[in-house]
Image (cartoon, rainbow, N blue to C red):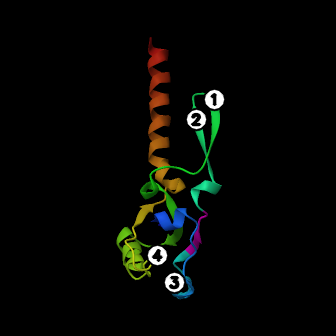
Amino acid sequence: MRFIAMVRATRASEAGEMPSKKLLTEMGRFNEELARAGVLLAGEGLHPSVRGARIRYEGDRRSVLDGPFAETKELIAGFWLLQCASLEEAAEWLKRAPNPFEDGVSEVEIRRIFEAEDFAAALALGEREAQLREQLARQS
């Protein structure tokens, strides 16, 4: 199973403050440990939202909204993409990570990533419903 662990942004990360050399070293060691264990698929920090954009979809219309975005606590400052056997295993790994914002309060959200096979049951159900509709239509 693949999981994404999203590091929530802070005022400091949104202001573009770079991590200390100490934190970068600790994160590097942690990422190396994840890689050696075969768990790390990717891990990156993100630029502040002022350098980003959002695409808003309204029916057929599309619009581009330039950053920065409000509600810092809802933004993502970085992520790890992990291959683990369970959510519990992913959580155990992340509990070992250095605090992403050193002495401050940090929050990392872990979510499972959908795989193609996760949609198989829904697709099969949809196909079965379509077949049933065709059968009912022929009987009418």
- Residue highlighted by disc 2: 57
User: What residue do we see at 46% from left, 23% from top?
Assistant: 133
Q: Under tag 2, what secondary structure?
A: strand
Q: Which residue is denoted by mark 4 in the rendering?
A: 100
Q: Residue under circle 1?
A: 61
Mark 4 residue crowding within 10 angstroms, few (<14) / some (14–19) / many (20+): many
Image position, residue 6 (x, y; %)? 47, 64
Secondary structure of residue under mark 1:
strand
Q: Position of residue 127 (x, y in %)?
A: 50, 36
- Label of residue 23 in the image: 3
Mark 2–mark 1 CB contact (< 8 Å): yes
Q: Is residue 5 visible?
A: no
Give the x, y percent position of residue 118: 47, 53
| Amino acid tagged 1 | Arg
- Provide the residue span drawn in magenta: 41-47
Name the amino acid, label 4: Pro
Q: In the image, what residue type sits under mark 2?
A: Tyr
| Disc 3, SS | helix
**Residue 139 vertical placement versus 31 (above, below):** above
Sequence-first disc among 3 and 2:
3
- In whole angstroms, how far apart are the C-alphas of marks 2 and 4? 32 Å
Secondary structure, mark 4, is: loop
Q: Main secondary structure of the magenta part?
A: strand
Q: Badges 3 and 1: C-beta atoms under 8 Å apart?
A: no
Q: Residues within 10 Å of mark 3 (few under 14, many from 20)?
A: some
Query: Label 3 sits on what residue type?
Result: Leu
Residue at 53% across, 88% down: 22
